[in-house]
Image (cartoon, grey):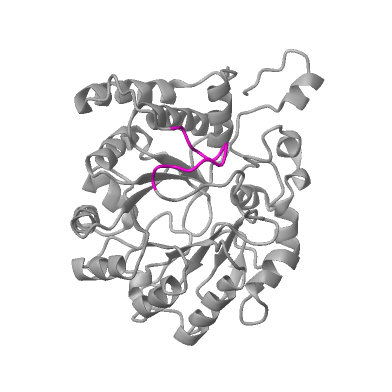
Amino acid sequence: MFDITKKPFIIFWELTRACLLACKHCRAKAQTKRHPDELSTRECYGVVEQILDFKKPYPLVIITGGDPLMRDDLFDIIDFMTSNGLRVAIAFSGTKLATKDKLEKMRSLGVSRIAISIDGSNPDIHDYFRGKTGTFEKSLEIIKDARDVDLPVQINTTVTNYNIPDLPNIMKLCIENEVVLWDVFFLVPTGRARADIMPSAQEFEDVLCWLYDVNKETPLNIKSSAACHLRRIEHMRDKGIYDIKLGEVYYKLRDKLESLERELGFGDYKGDKEIVTGAYGRSMSDGIRRMTGITDGRGMMFISHIGEVYPSGFLPLTAGNIREQTLEEIYINSRIFRDLKDPNNLKGKCGICEYRFICGGSRARAYAMTGDYLAQEPRCVYVPKQKRDQIPNEPKGL
């Protein structure tokens, strides 16, 4: 059994903040040069040993950045991790650094999957976000190369006001490239990301309900990041109790989905794939098992390039540093992790919501917009049953 009060289910490890790109929504405010105080190779080996101290089953480790390909010792670190039995995935930038030889090396070292960001279905949209021309075509080339060397690929997409209408086209690109997972991230206004490009609460609900449809009606596996509302939506729609009024964005996306289903031959899709967004802790067919209720600080931790430990990369409150404490000590004893492990500590409507143990809202977005990581999710339309019971005729969604 995996006890998330004692150890994280998933660890994101930022090996470097160096990156050749300058993405407009970059959490890390990545720079072109590596930080002089980055963890050394020896210190990275020490981090791996601390992860192993959690004992089996080990946490899943996602190597991220910046761009981890900016580190010359990347493959030595990966080799040390996988040879010691850790499951490792890696997210890197769509640049010239991601050669086919390096992808083949990742596969040979046992990397479970790579993640490439696609934020638009064409260069005009994607390259605008990435801050450099040519990244769209390069990213598609990397995806093709990875498939050629039999390395599973995940596509990550950040949802903003600019690319919502393009989401069906990105979905089509995911299906055509046979990716194992489409991870749809809902913007958190931190780092370079500005609040004015973040969708509204109703748009969150609309897009998430559409993603449920895509997950149900096509072979594409989908998860949401920084939008645990999808777990609530999955539960409500599976049980036939969803009656929140949806907006214009949903119906426009729905129309486009139906058109693409006919074009791609999924109009009568009868797949027996379970809908898995995290509401039940079931395993996806993408090879990465799931657990119920994982979110910032609750089954999740983030290690920065200089050893600082956060509940997530988008909640930049330091709980400790691996140069001074062990990961186990930080995860079990630090105040912020203790606060976040218990959804009953949440404030506002999140604290009384019947879905707080499977959702709980984005703690990173709450902190970014209110300064309080326990505040209610700022981008959720759902009204909890307890609140509706207190106010006669209160609708489920506002």
Q: Quadrant of residue 307?
A: bottom right
Q: Residue at x 62, y 44 (%)?
A: 293
Q: Is residue 279 magenta?
A: yes
Instruction: Give the number of marks.
Output: 0
The C terminus - image quarter = top right
Q: Position of residue 161 (x, y in %)?
A: 42, 39
In the picture shown, does residue 320 fall above or below 262?
below
Looking at the picture, tell me which residue is in the foreground, 61 or 170: 61
Q: In the rendered view, would you say 170 is above or below 52?
A: above
Asked which quadrant contains residue 269, the reply is: top left
* Residue 296 visible here: yes
Q: Is residue 214 magenta?
A: no
> Residue drawn at (20%, 25%), measured in percent from left and top?
263
Magenta range is 274-286
Q: Position of residue 54 (x, y in %)?
A: 62, 68
From the viewer's perspective, is residue 151 above or below residue 349?
Answer: below
Residue 364 left/right relative to 253: right
Q: Nearer the viewer, residue 288 or 278?
A: 288
Name the residue at 28% across, 42% down: 174
123 on left or right of 9:
left
The picture places residue 358, in percent across and down from the top left corner, at 63, 40
